[in-house]
């Protein structure tokens, strides 16, 4: 072994370091609402109900997304308890999977040094670091998509080199199946689109046929099909709702939330990958691919140049396909383009290695230090300035619940509160559920409305129509209410008593029936 190769970290050490870094502040922030509260809450309901097959939101079947995130999070919560870092462990795993997939691919076909820098650039991008500690489905599916692309690309390159490739190919099919279970069809469509485009643009079109594998398709079906088939058997409208409405209609129509212009992701990607943006710009306006110094112990120069050219083509195609795909629909969210960050990280790292081939160069190290500090500062800022959590009501609310005082939401579901309370059952939500315009809007109330359609027996007990509001006030001597601040316009009885606590998004009332009767409440 040469002196240069001794400096390379073993793969297990890289894997542990990446995991430790991605976990280091996962305990710090309260759950963000609505996303983190929603998805951690669905996982908690699996534990609470013992039903790990059907995801439920407030006790009602919730089919906006498939179950992989909920399964992993429920397993984490059951193992480590209802802690914040355990609620985020599935996202950490997705980020770790994507980072290690990139590292292993680049190490095998580009060299250990550029692989190490690739993973460093990736995990110190605030976008990737923050996404790893955000409990929703985007990072998990990004990890599955990235790993599927990595395995398929490795299979292509290994097959060209006359090496064993079938296990990597079957692994790509398995990861595509997990991607289906993580967020739906994009887990299969995007890896396939990236690999096919890469092969066509690099003149490897014959390799497309080599990637078609009957054993791989069997693996894909064994991984993904059982849950979808089970849901369709239990809920006959499942396929239409999940595939037609949630996938195609939401992708093509314009009546949904988060409407943005086609170029939305370009400035977003630049801003959320600081301070690596200057290095990224070097990949765009710098010199084209050329020979780079190959440390002793790595592949010969000719092989290194060919492999590096294949990786650069893959990285550009990978990044562009993801950006174009998610720029087509009018509805856009930042987390959608997380799968575009691993190829960007490789392009940045490869450029750095060209510009500063010496291992002692200070510029890449300075960028790395600045990026790491920025990640930590941004998480700290989120802790300091994000005041949307409902957790501050716990000291007031928990004693009331122990005394048997019922809790009810009015107009909105407080997504993070069931997780903090370890709530033993659904929480009634009083709202105008018979509003004919409600199904036309893409919002949180419609999520619950759609869920209620799949369980018409339970729905009337959980989704309480506004017409029963006064009945609830009359039936309960005391009632704890969580609602938005402006709800008093539609529910004037809440204005008769001041809230006991006022948060950024919600107020909490403790209503006393006798006091309300004295102020004009009429009960039969």
Image: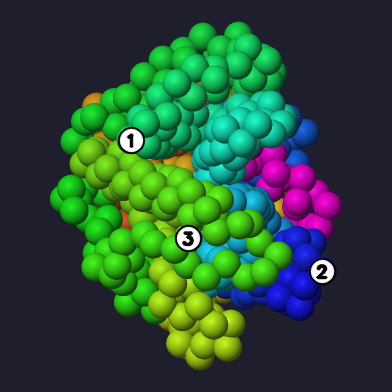
| Cα–Cα span, label 2 and label 1 | 38 Å
Question: Toward the viewer: 244 or 281?
Answer: 281
Q: Is residue 301 left or right of residue 431?
A: right
Q: What residue do we see at 83% from left, 52% from top?
A: 79
Q: Secondary structure at mark 1?
A: helix
The residue pinned by badge 1 equals 201
Queried whether the magenta region covers residue 76, the answer comes back as yes
**Category of crowding for the residue at label 3, using alpha-carbon neighbours closer than 10 angstroms: few (below 14), some (14–19), many (at least 20):** many
Q: Residue furthest left?
A: 261
| Count of marks placed on residues | 3
The residue pinned by badge 2 equals 1
Question: Toward the viewer: 261 or 249?
Answer: 261
Q: Is residue 117 left or right of residue 289?
A: right
| Type of secondary structure dominating the magenta stretch | helix
Specify the segment rendered in magenta: 63-82
Q: Is residue 501 left or right of residue 228?
A: left
**In the picture, residue 29 is in which quadrant?**
bottom right
Q: Say whether marks 3 and 2 touch (CB < 8 Å).
A: no
| Cα–Cα span, label 3 and label 1 | 19 Å
Question: Toward the viewer: 325 or 492?
Answer: 325
Q: What residue do we see at 49% from left, 29% from top?
A: 188
Question: Toward the viewer: 243 or 453?
Answer: 243
Q: Secondary structure at mark 3?
A: helix
Q: Viewer-nearest of labels 3 and 2? A: 2
Residue 355 appears in the figure: yes
Q: Closer to the N terminus: mark 3 or mark 1?
A: 1
The residue pinned by badge 3 equals 346
Q: Closer to the N terminus: mark 2 or mark 1?
A: 2
| Cα–Cα span, label 3 and label 2 | 26 Å
Queried whether the magenta region covers residue 487, the answer comes back as no
Residue 277 appears in the figure: no
């Amino acid at each position: 072994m040469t002196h240069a190769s001794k400096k390379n970290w073993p793969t297990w050490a890289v894997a542990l370091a990446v995991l430790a870094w991605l976990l280091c502040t996962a305990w710090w922030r309260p759950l963000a609402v609505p996303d983190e509260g929603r998805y951690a809450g669905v996982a908690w309901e699996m534990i609470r109900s013992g039903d790990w097959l059907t995801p439920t939101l407030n006790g009602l079947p919730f089919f906006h997304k498939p179950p992989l995130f909920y399964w992993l999070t429920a397993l984490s919560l059951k193992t480590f308890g209802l802690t914040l870092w355990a609620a985020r462990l599935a996202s950490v795993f997705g980020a770790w999977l994507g980072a290690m997939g990139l590292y292993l691919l680049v190490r095998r076909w580009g060299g250990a040094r550029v692989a190490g820098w690739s993973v460093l650039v990736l995990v110190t991008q605030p976008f990737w670091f923050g996404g790893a500690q955000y409990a929703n489905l985007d990072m998990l599916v990004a990890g599955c998509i990235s790993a599927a692309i990595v395995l398929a690309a490795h299979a292509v390159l290994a097959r060209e080199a006359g090496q064993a490739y079938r296990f990597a190919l079957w692994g790509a099919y398995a990861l595509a199946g997990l991607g289906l279970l993580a967020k739906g069809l994009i887990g299969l469509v995007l890896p396939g689109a990236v690999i096919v485009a890469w092969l066509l643009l690099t003149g490897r079109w014959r390799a497309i046929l080599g990637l078609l594998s009957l054993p791989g398709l069997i693996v894909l079906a064994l991984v993904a099909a059982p849950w979808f088939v089970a849901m369709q058997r239990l809920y006959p409208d499942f396929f239409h709702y999940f595939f037609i409405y949630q996938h195609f209609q939401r992708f093509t129509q314009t009546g949904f939330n988060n409407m943005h212009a086609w170029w939305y992701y370009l400035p977003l990607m630049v801003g959320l990958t600081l301070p690596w943006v200057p290095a990224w710009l070097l990949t765009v306006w710098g010199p084209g691919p050329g020979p780079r110094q190959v440390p002793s112990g790595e592949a010969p120069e000719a092989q290194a140049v060919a492999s590096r050219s294949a990786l650069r083509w893959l990285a550009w195609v990978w990044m562009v396909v993801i950006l174009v795909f998610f720029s087509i629909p009018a509805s856009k969210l930042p987390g959608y383009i997380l799968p575009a960050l691993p190829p960007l990280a490789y392009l940045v790292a490869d450029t750095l290695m060209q510009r500063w081939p010496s291992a002692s160069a200070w510029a890449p190290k300075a960028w790395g230090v600045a990026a790491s500090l920025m990640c930590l500062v941004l998480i700290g800022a989120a802790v300091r300035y994000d005041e949307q959590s409902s957790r501050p009501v716990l000291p007031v609310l928990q004693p009331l619940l122990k005394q048997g005082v019922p809790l009810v939401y009015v107009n909105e579901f407080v997504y993070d509160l069931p997780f903090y309370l370890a709530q033993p059952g659904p929480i009634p939500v009083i709202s105008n559920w018979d509003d004919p315009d409600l199904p036309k809007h893409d919002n949180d109330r419609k999520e619950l409305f759609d869920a209620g359609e799949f369980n018409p027996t339970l729905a009337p007990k959980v989704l309480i129509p506004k017409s029963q509001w006064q009945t609830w006030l009359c039936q309960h001597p005391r009632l704890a209410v969580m609602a938005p601040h402006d709800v008093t316009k539609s529910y004037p009885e809440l204005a008769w008593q001041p809230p006991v606590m006022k948060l950024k998004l919600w107020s909490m009332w403790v209503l006393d029936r006798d006091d309300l009767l004295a102020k004009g409440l009429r009960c039969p």
